[in-house]
Amino acid sequence: MTTVNREWKTLIVEDEAPTRDLLVSYCLSRPELRLSKVAKDGEEALEYLQSEEFDLAFLDINLPILSGLEILEKLENPPYIIFITALRDRAIEAFELGAIDYLLKPFSKERFFKAVDRSIQFLQKNDEKTSGNVFNEHGLFILEKENHFLIPYKDINFISSRDNFSIVHTDEREYVTYKSLKSLETKLPPGRFLRIYKQHIINLEKLSHLQSDNMGNYLVYLKDEDETQLPVGRKYISKMKDMF
């Protein structure tokens, strides 16, 4: 069993009373988990998740009002998710939305503990890299579906956001993660990256030049393989001009 130096704030979302009671019992048997809230339907769960920050959530897929998948799609910065389902096929959808694990009903205490241990490993790694704004010297650590990647800073051209996810652009490929741009920005070392637009952060090492027109609009040109051009938001123009 994994040992940790802190407790992880946990949410349970389950509409079936027997499974909900079982989850509560199992959570209380793990001292690493601090059970904070229990929700019985999708609406209640979304309210909790939008008003509080959780480290880990046990989220049933089939819920009244809003499904677990619908809840996750509405969150800008979701916690680590362990989905609960009676259908193995739904678990595939869960992984596509970034779930770290799933519990197939009926599940044993042993299987529950295995999912918790796996989650705590990822929580500890993420905590070590972001606690106190201590940046990982090797690169940006992200979760894409069920895979974790460490992307060297030098390989990142820019990061963009779209709907409820962010995209890390490199020459080799694009990495899609269900983390907000604001969340990723806190993991980037200052002085190497710069927010230039509500939906864009650029790697300053990739910056080629800045172009303006007579209407006061600015474009940033990058030195990547695609010769990317990105707009500069008006609230970020002064910071860009100061750099030049």
Image (cartoon, rainbow, N blue to C red):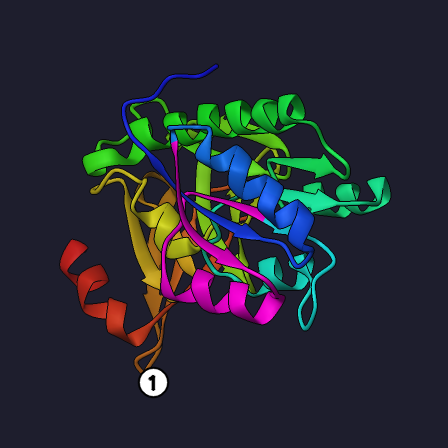
The residue shown at (37%, 66%) is 51
Residue lying at the far bottom in this picture: please name it: 215
Looking at the image, can residue 4 be seen?
yes
The residue shown at (64%, 21%) is 110
Q: Which residues are magenta?
A: 33-58
| Residue 103: percent from left, percent from top | 69, 36
What is the number of callouts on the image?
Answer: 1
| Residue 81: percent from left, percent from top | 56, 44
Relative depth, front residue between 171 and 70: 70
Relative depth, front residue between 81 and 236: 81
Going by the numbered disc 1, the residue's amino acid type is: Met
Looking at the image, can residue 97 be seen?
no
Quadrant housing the C terminus: bottom left
Q: Would you say 2 lies left or right of 165 here?
A: left
Relative depth, front residue between 166 and 158: 166
Task: Please name the residue that numbered disc 1 is placed on.
Answer: 215
Q: Quadrant of residue 133?
A: top left
| Residue 87: percent from left, percent from top | 84, 45
Residue 19 in the magenta stretch? The answer is no
Q: Would you say 191 lies left or right of 4 here?
A: left
| Residue 171: percent from left, percent from top | 56, 36
Q: Quick one: label 1, few (<14), some, or many (20+) residues within 10 Å? A: few
Residue 36 in the magenta stretch? The answer is yes
Residue lying at the far left in this picture: please name it: 242
100 vs 1: above or below: below
Q: Would you say 3 lies left or right of 117 here?
A: left
The residue shown at (14%, 60%) is 242
Residue lying at the far top in this picture: please name it: 1
Give the secondary structure at mark 1: loop
